[in-house]
Amino acid sequence: MKYKSLVAIDDYSKDDYLEIMDLAAYFEKNPVQKLLDGKVAATLFFEPSTRTRLSFESAVNRLGGKVLGFSDSSQTSVSKGETLKDTILMVGCYVDLIIMRHPLEGAARYASEISKVPIINAGDGANQHPSQCLLDLYSITKTQGTLENLKITMVGDLKYGRTVHSLIMALSHFNPTFSFIAPEELRLPEEYRTFLQQRNIPFEEHTELAPNINDCDILYMTRVQRERFADPLEYEKVKNVYILKNSMLDHTKPNMKILHPLPRVNEISTDVDDNPKAYYFEQAQNGVYTRQAIICKVLQLK
Amino acid sequence: MKNTKTLSVSAIENGTVIDHIPAQNLFNVISILGLDQLTESQITFGYNLPSEKLGRKAIIKIADKFFEDIEVDKIALVAPHAKLNIIRNYEVVEKRQVNVPEQIFNIARCMNPKCITNHENIPTKFRVINDGKVKLKCCYCEKDTDIEHMKLVNK
């Protein structure tokens, strides 16, 4: 049987996305399934990411598998100068599956080429983080009943936000309409605008938040990070422009839900948390079901 | 009387002549084709020759050496208009153009300083994208490297 690693969101087709959606719904109804009984997964986190690691480890545990790994490469032989290749080949002798996060871009793709066990990319630098994208898709499916024909409004750091870029690619299969709200400095890159134009996917661009959120089905918020700005003054100018407040939600659609990949800093005011349209904590919960689905698909268990 | 029109590179009996190389990329072509590693063939090259199309061009003559298409296509990135003349018994028996390949292996370096290929000893791999302008998309980090900024792998 040929395993298929998951490195980038476009490793999957539309059918693959829908299969993950069905599997995630199945695990949500039946969370404890001993499909990984007797199997071991490694979580190799060459840079720390507590949320993603715990979510994956929870998924493995719920499937009855065992987890080993590290959450910071400073305690491992990587700090002695071991190459990624050697680490992957060595760990592949101990486990059935490797879930890895690495600060360098392309690390997961390279690992998938040399590894004899499948790789799940849990983030490679600013490049890809496909499990986040799939859990976003699952959250959209769950709240809207479909992925088709939705209006998705994305806010914040659209230039560097990899979750934004992945979601655009994935949703392009489902006839969406997009609205992008960002400061000029963090505007969606040319390559993604071209991508949408080539596929005749309609989109609009705005710089103001409040007047432009009333017609969307999904409001996808992201964090505007200080470190993205070469000029700290530019950050100061825009940092408070994209803060979502509860009072802005009065005229939004009843089915609208607010998503955020988390962690949030101040871009969603805490008074939004109790609004039924806030969905970001459930979204994190969906991450466990989605990762159970991904693990099973990668290992071809279900 | 000195004849200023004589080309100071002599004809070859058998081998390959690569013409229409942009002068500034002569040494890149030599490096990509590994000509500096050849120990048998006699190689002569002309540098900074006048060219209507390129301004300054270079030409390489390699005696007793014939290239596979797949080898020659590697130079398309730095010499897209290069023409090959295959010489047998002092006659041009075949003319060939170079074609930009779909993928290139371990020729160029990725521009992205955070790419894994710039930190570990990994052969690079790119898909060649041509949307009006030729670019290389790294198969690892997925970032684009444009031809103007392209640096070659040190072999």
Image (cartoon, rainbow, N blue to C red):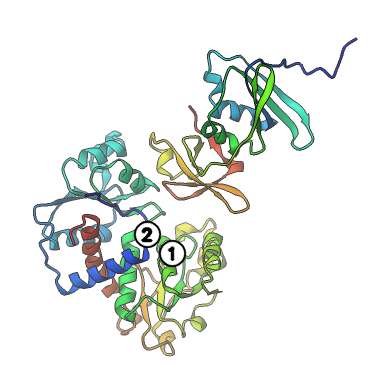
Within-10-Å neighbours for mark 1: few <14, some 14–19, many 20+? some
- The alpha-carbon separation of the residues under discs 1 and 2 comes to 8 Å
* Mark 1, residue position: A169
Name the element at disc 1. helix
Residue B2 appears left or right of A224: right
Q: Which amino acid, mark 2?
A: Ile
Q: Which mark is residue A241?
A: none
Name the element at disc 2. helix
x then y, percent, for residue A94: 16, 42
Q: Are marks 1 and 2 on the same chain?
A: yes
* Mark 2, residue position: A9
Tell me what residue is drawn at x 27 percent, y 59 percent. A52
Q: Quadrant of residue A248?
A: bottom left
Q: Which amino acid, mark 1?
A: Met
x then y, percent, for residue B93: 66, 25
Q: Are marks 1 and 2 in contact (CB under 8 Å)?
A: yes
Tell me what residue is drawn at x 29 percent, y 52 percent. A5
Residue A263 visible to an observer of this rendering: no
Q: Nearer the viewer, residue A120 or B13?
A: B13
Residue A78 appears left or right of A202: left
Residue A274 appears left or right of A169: left
